[in-house]
Structure formats: C-alpha cells, structure tokens
C-alpha cells in the first residue's frame, strides 16, 4: 500500500507538468494515442526479443515522429491524425499479438496496470525516470511555454521550435513507457488530463497550474488507493474516478474564470 | 542606413496557388515600410517569409545576422486552458526589470493591466499589450501585422504616433502591414502595394497617384491614400511632411477623407 502510494505520487509528479502542456497544446488525444501505440510496442518488444518497455519506448518515439512529420505538412488536422494513429496502432498491436501463439500477454495488466504490486525496483525506475524527465522539462520550460502561447511569435523571437517540440514529445513518450508497466496505459493518459483540467481554475499562471496539477494528481492517487483498499475497488480505475471527482468539484466550487480583474 | 532585410524575387506557392510572385522588398534601419493590399494579397505571407517563419520557394531572403525582432502577429488568441497574466506574457522570451516592464506598458497606456489575466482583456487592450511586448524586446526591426485592428480612430492615430516615436528614439526599422488604405503614416519611407506581386512601390504620395494603385483599388480607392501626420492633414498635399509635435492632441484627427 505504501509502495503503491509512493509509486503513484511519482507518476503524478511527472504527469502534472507534462499534462499541462498536453492540455495547453490541445493534444489531449496524444496521451491516448501513445497508450494505444504502447500495446503495439509490447508486441514489438516480444517480436524483437527485447524487453517490452524498450519496445514501448521505440514505438512511442516512432509514433511521435510520424505525428511531427505530418504536422509539418499540415495536410491532415492533428486531431484526425491522432485518432488514426491511435486506432491503427491498437489494431496492429492486437494483430501482432494474435500471431504470437507462444506468448501470453496480460492485456488487462497493460491497460490498467497493477499499482498494488509495485516493487521497490519499480519505484526506483519511476523516480529515476521522473528525475530525468523533470530536469529535461525544466530545461525547455520557458521556450516551450513561449511556443505554446504563440508558435510564430516565439520563432520570430528566436526560439528553436523543432528541437523543443521533439524533446517535449520524447518526454511524453518516455513517461508513457515508464508508467505503463506500473499503473497501466489508461491510468497514465487519465493522469495526464484530468488533474490538469481540475487545476485550471485554481491557477493564475502556467507554473502555478503545473504545481496545482501535481498536488491534485497526488490527492487523486491517495484517495483512489484509500477507497480501493477500503471498499475493495480496482485500484487504477479508483484513482481515475477520484481524479474525475476532483474535476467535478473544481467546476462546481472553484473560483470563476470570469472574475473581475484587479485594478 | 544598413538594410535589415533584403528580399529578392521571392516566390511562395501554397496548394498550387501562387501566393507571392517575384516580390522585391527592402527594410532598412530607421525606415518605416508600409505594406498595403487587398484581402488575400499575401501581405501576412510576405511578413512570414521576411521573418523566416515560412520558407520562400523562389528567390532569396537575407536577414542581417544581429536582427532583433519585435513582432506583433495579425492574430493572437490564447487558449483558455492556459492561465497567463500580462506580466508573464510580456516576459515570455526576455528578462527585463520591473521598471522596464512598467515603462513599456505605460507607453501604450496599459500600465494598470500589469497583473490582469490575458483572458479578461478587451481586443483593444490586448492589442496595446502585444504592442508594448514587441517594444520591450528593444528590437532593431519592428514587424507589425495590422497593429490598428481592434483600435478605434483615436487609438489608431495614437498607435501611429507611438510607432513613429519609437522609430525616432531607437532608430529601428519598421515593417507595417495595413489593410486600411484610407490612412498611411506620413512618416512612411516607402509603401509597397501588394497583390501577390508588387503592383507599385515608392513614397506614399506617388503610390496614391500610380495607375496600378488606382486599377487595383478602383475609383473608390482613388485618392483615399490619405496620410496621417501629427497635424492637420486635410490636404494630403505632396509635401505632407511630418511634424514632430506631441503636445497638441486637441485638433481634429477625423477629417482624413479625400477632398
């Protein structure tokens, strides 16, 4: 239980700031797409004889690269493209797994994870990954915010757009791959989105919003695990449900966005 | 006056449509260059090529290596999911002292909005903040894509005064895009009249009489290329010179129409 809490808070720590950018950049489907692609990655991992986590990372990076390439062309709208990639990756992943008679893949395990079964080693992985992802994100934070506000403006003011965007997508890919084994792909894409949406009303600046998101994510993890233990609920879905409850509460009781401005 | 941007025979194709065709344009230090043309003439595309945001398909674009650009984009809309104060928006890519920040906002008379959320600003207020933001970078090239949109007549006149004041003080070059043919700053060094190619260019009065200009904007456009000067400019006479006088704002700015 304590290990689950530590692991979940670690995931919330990475998912908070990254999730803010996912929401601000209107890439809510991106987490979903990567989660679905992760399944293809698991299959690829088995096929290539490498560990599933390496397969997931490779696939996520490949999907991000396809996305960036198409975005540069601007022939297909980003949300359509994400939908296509998401379902295509999921289908190809399932087909590939279907071909592997000798491999039994625990699909439910990958989708929902088993946070109650995390080991000390997993926790090391999460916090090691968090340290790398968060320090990389801190390094690109300012230019990434500028690019998110207005891409043309940021580029005209000398921001290296392509490099920053690639680093950001890699960070999301790494996060999904890291979190998948421990908390499942559904939980990570939910933790990228829901606490962020809940945090919006409580923040007046991007940094504050990232901080509030982390706190709300941790509250969701704690509340979810507590209810999971108390009422014997599946832990992953309980965390997502708690986060959703927080979001609804923020809508009902959070400060209004259209408050009069200070003069 | 060293050139900041030199564009030579620039062409741009998008979806098999020729957006820009053999465009030559130069913006030098201390110049105010105004770009006018009908909707869809490629004005914003030309600005994007000049800034390096779009890559030209033909021709060459040479930017001075030490170019420091202050840019006011044509459209600026912040996603409502991203909380941001005026102060934070101003300092996205520059580090400045509070005094500098305050001075830039005060110059556009929006100093009181420093802690306001961007999402609560009116169109005119946002335009002024974005203008202040462009100035704050202490640019040697100011690129303003339709700076007077969302501003009323007084606001537009004031905006032109500010542009000229900045130019006079810092000696920066200014590239100004305007959809409004009825008023072009008298301080403009050169007008480019664009309709995917450069129809005509030159000093504002000459362009106003150019047959190409008249053909492009028709009889209604003829004679409407009025010049904004700081003083009474009812007659857009060929010698419509600039008067550096900022004290007298009580005169009538509203009679810029043709006579």
Image (cartoon, helix red, strand yellow):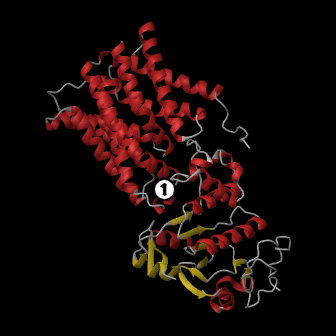
> In which quarter of the view is residue B110 placed?
bottom right
- Residue toward you, B245 or B224: B245
Q: Residue at x 56, y 27 (%)?
A: A247
- Residue toward you, B100 or B153: B100
- Residue toward you, B130 or A32: B130
Q: Is residue B167 left or right of residue B16?
A: right
Rate crowding at label 1 as few (under 14), some (14 to 19) or many (20 or more) other CA atoms within 10 Å.
some
Q: Residue at x 59, y 53 (%)?
A: B77
Residue B254, how many percent across, how many down?
Answer: 83, 73
Q: Is residue A194 above or below residue A27?
A: above
> In which quarter of the view is residue B245 placed?
bottom right
Q: Is residue B185 above or below residue B142?
A: below
Residue B5, how many percent across, how many down?
Answer: 47, 77
Q: Is residue B177 visible?
A: no
Q: Is residue A98 visible?
A: yes
Q: Which residue is mark 1?
A: A151
Q: Residue at x 59, y 60 (%)?
A: B75
Residue B20, how many percent across, how many down?
Answer: 49, 77
Q: Is residue A43 left or right of residue B84?
A: left
Residue B248, how many percent across, how many down?
Answer: 82, 72
Quarter of the picture containing the C terminus of chain B is bottom right
SS at mark 1? helix
> In which quarter of the view is residue A3 placed?
top left
């Amino acid at each position: 239980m304590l290990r689950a809490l530590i692991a979940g808070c670690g995931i919330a720590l990475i998912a908070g700031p990254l999730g803010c950018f996912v929401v601000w950049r209107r890439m809510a489907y991106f987490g979903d797409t990567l989660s679905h692609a992760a399944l293809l990655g698991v299959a690829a991992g088995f096929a290539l004889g490498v560990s599933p986590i390496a397969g997931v990372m490779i696939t996520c990076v490949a999907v991000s690269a396809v996305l960036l390439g198409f975005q540069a062309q601007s022939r297909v709208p980003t949300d359509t493209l994400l939908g296509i990639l998401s379902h295509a990756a999921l289908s190809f992943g399932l087909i590939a797994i279907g071909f592997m008679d000798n491999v039994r893949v625990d699909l439910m395990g990958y989708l929902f994870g088993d946070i109650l079964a995390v080991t000390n080693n997993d926790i090391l992985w999460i916090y090691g990954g968090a340290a790398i992802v968060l320090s990389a994100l801190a390094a690109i934070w300012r230019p990434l915010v500028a690019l998110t506000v207005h891409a043309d403006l940021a580029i005209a003011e000398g921001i290296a757009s392509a490099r920053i965007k690639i680093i950001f997508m890699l960070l999301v890919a790494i996060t999904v791959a890291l979190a998948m084994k421990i908390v499942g792909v559904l939980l990570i894409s939910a933790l990228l989105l829901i606490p962020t949406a809940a945090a919006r009303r409580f923040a007046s600046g991007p940094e504050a919003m990232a901080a509030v998101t982390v706190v709300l994510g941790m509250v969701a993890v704690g509340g979810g695990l507590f209810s999971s233990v108390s009422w014997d609920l599946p832990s992953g879905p309980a965390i997502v449900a708690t986060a959703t409850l927080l979001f609804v509460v923020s809508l009902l009781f959070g400060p209004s966005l259209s408050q009069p401005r200070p003069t | 006056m060293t050139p900041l941007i030199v564009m030579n025979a620039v062409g741009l194709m998008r979806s098999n449509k020729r957006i820009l065709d053999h465009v030559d344009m130069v913006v030098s230090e201390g110049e105010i260059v105004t770009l006018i043309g009908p909707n869809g003439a490629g004005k914003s595309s030309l600005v994007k090529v000049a800034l390096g945001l779009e890559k030209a398909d033909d021709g060459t674009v040479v930017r001075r290596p030490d170019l420091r650009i202050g840019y006011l984009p044509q459209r600026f809309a912040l996603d409502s999911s991203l909380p941001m104060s005026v102060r934070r928006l101003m300092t996205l890519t520059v580090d400045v002292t509070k005094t500098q920040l305050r001075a830039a906002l005060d110059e556009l008379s929006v100093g009181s909005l420093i802690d306001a959320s961007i999402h609560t600003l009116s169109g005119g207020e946002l335009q002024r903040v974005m203008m202040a933001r462009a100035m704050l970078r202490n640019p040697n090239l100011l690129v303003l894509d339709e700076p007077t949109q969302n501003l009323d007549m007084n606001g537009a006149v004031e905006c032109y005064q500010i542009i000229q004041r900045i130019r006079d003080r810092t000696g920066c070059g200014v590239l100004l895009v305007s959809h409004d043919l009825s008023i072009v700053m008298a301080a403009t060094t050169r007008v480019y009249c664009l309709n995917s190619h450069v129809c005509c260019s030159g000093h504002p009065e000459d362009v106003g009489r150019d047959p190409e200009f008249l053909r492009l904007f028709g009889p209604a456009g003829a004679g409407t290329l009025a010049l904004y000067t700081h003083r009474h400019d009812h007659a857009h006479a060929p010698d419509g010179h600039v008067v550096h006088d900022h004290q007298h704002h009580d005169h009538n700015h509203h009679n810029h129409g043709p006579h």
